[in-house]
Image: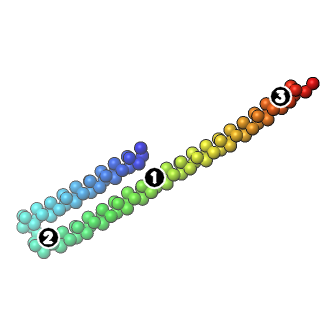
Amino acid sequence: QKQREQQQLHYQESQDLLQQHQREGRQLENLYREGRLSDDGKVELSAEMENTHRMELVKLHEDHHKEQVELTNLIFESASSSVAACEENSKGDTATAKHNSATSQLKDEQLLQP
């Protein structure tokens, strides 16, 4: 459940960043069309914007990967704790069963004695 929620959040964050980048690209295009940006300025700003967008996307993916690793570790630790608790319970059940068997055997021996 938690993994699914995290995946949905990561998808939404990626889509939001993509939409932001598209808006910025359209704004740059509008500035150029309005004559407020020269050809050289457009090329320079486009390259700078693409580089920034690429770095933002890489950082977002790195953050997502880090969160995924942390969640996986938590799930693994939780599962390990559950297994250890089950093993402890199993040991306790085995000890109880041995105790009950020994007690039962002792009672049987006492009943058999004259």
Image position, residue 14 (x, y; %): 29, 55
Residue receiving disc 3? 108
Q: Amino acid at mark 1?
A: Leu
Mark 2 and mark 1 lie on one chain; the one further toward the N terminus is 2
Q: At 61% from the left edge and 43% from the top edge, which residue is drawn?
A: 86
**Pointer 2: residues within 10 angstroms few (<14), some, or many (20+)?**
some
Say which of 2 and 83 sits in front: 83
Residue linked to disc 1: 71
Q: Are marks 3 and 1 in contact (CB under 8 Å)?
A: no
- Amino acid type at mark 2: Lys
Q: Which residue matches tag 2?
A: 42
Q: Quadrant of residue 53?
A: bottom left
Q: Marks 2 and 3, how far apart in space? A: 97 Å
**x then y, percent, for residue 47:** 20, 71
Reply above or below: 32 against 12: below
Q: Quadrant of the C terminus?
A: top right
